[in-house]
Amino acid sequence: MILFPHAKINIGLNITRRRPDGYHDLETIFYPIKINDALEVIRADAMSFDASGLGIPGKAEDNLCLKGYQLLAADFDLPPVSIHLHKHIPIGAGLGGGSADAAFFIKAINTELSLGLTAEQMRGYARQLGADCAFFIDGEPTYAFGKGDEFEPVELDLSGYHLVLLMPPAHVSTAEAYRGVKPKPSEASLKDLIKLPVGEWKHHIRNDFEEHIFISHPVIRGLKAALYEAGALYACMSGSGASVFGIFDSRADLSHLEKDNQVFYGV
Ligand SMILES: C[C@@](CO)(OP(=O)(O)O)[C@H](O)COP(=O)(O)OP(=O)(O)OC[C@H]1O[C@@H](n2ccc(N)nc2=O)[C@H](O)[C@@H]1O
Ligand SMILES: Nc1ncnc2c1ncn2[C@@H]1O[C@H](COP(=O)(O)OP(=O)(O)O)[C@@H](O)[C@H]1O
């Protein structure tokens, strides 16, 4: 079967506490967007994995799809499968592409091999592969808290707006992003703040990674400013960066940025 794992953006991200286990407590809103990979999983005589499209850093055997296979193989007698991943979601972008592939891989195996897992059971496996991975099992707008792996659904529909995503030629690793942040408690919950009109969000909703990432990667700060100059109602870095998104009330012209950055319109 072929599935199309989709990316996410983070609307706001508050890092509230460093935990004794070295991770951080946070609150954020995950919102699904229409930038997709393609993932094919079929039964085969021998196990294989190959990838096309954007180059994925690291060894093929460390790909999160294969990690997903190993995780399920510990509990189920799985036959070999052939996996092909076509990578289109920018990598190291704060778009959760690797996590999306892993979650969709679990969904594909569940269907293809009739494992009979419920969504809750699939979320349980996904959570072991990455903090945000379980979000992609359902992929509905979600308020995430704790390590970013505890969820509550939220009512949020941005389909009437025009979303633009910019990806600069920069890469931010998630661990690097967390290392530079100073946790502080939230003044108001993002669950309440997203009920404000989108035009008000810029006064209230922040991404706590931006402060230090904008110092080490000034190009990202420049792109956020460019989105506001082009008329964005709200602009923000997604997750740990390096991508930045803008929410517009109509189609925006960002063609002046296309030479140096990837520009995705209408996501
Ligand atoms: C920052 C966020 C926000 O949505 O995503 P991205 O923007 O990278 O997609 C997530 O918290 C990323 O989640 P995920 O990418 O699953 O992180 P993991 O692989 O679990 O962790 C990578 C590293 O980030 C740090 N980490 C992660 C999550 C967390 N709550 N606290 C942390 O300190 C740890 O150093 C960990 O070793
Ligand atoms: N299927 C995959 N797609 C992308 N990256 C993957 C995948 N599997 C493992 N990785 C590793 O995860 C790292 C982070 O990738 P990605 O999920 O795109 O970042 P982010 O969390 O910033 O969105 C990559 O640098 C790569 O080494």
Image: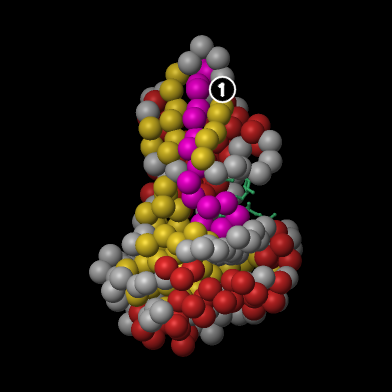
Q: Position of residue 248 (x, y in %)?
A: 34, 75
Q: Nearer the viewer, residue 156 or 124?
A: 156
The residue at 56%/22% (across/down) is 48
Q: Position of residue 158 (x, y in %)?
A: 31, 68
Quadrant location, the N terminus: top left
Q: Which residue is denoted by mark 1 in the rendering?
A: 48
Q: Nearer the viewer, residue 171 or 252?
A: 252
Highlighted magenta segment, given as a residue range: 78-95
Viewed as shown, does residue 8 lie left or right of 210?
Answer: left
Residue 87 lies in the magenta-colored region? yes
Q: Nearer the viewer, residue 163 or 42?
A: 163
As drawn, 141 above or below 211: above
Q: Amino acid at mark 1?
A: Ser
Quadrant location, the C terminus: bottom left
Q: Please, which residue is most extreme toward the top here?
A: 45
- For label 1, the SS is strand
The residue at 56%/80% (across/down) is 186
* Residue 117 seen in render: no
Dominant SS of magenta comes to loop
Q: Position of residue 173 (x, y in %)?
A: 67, 58
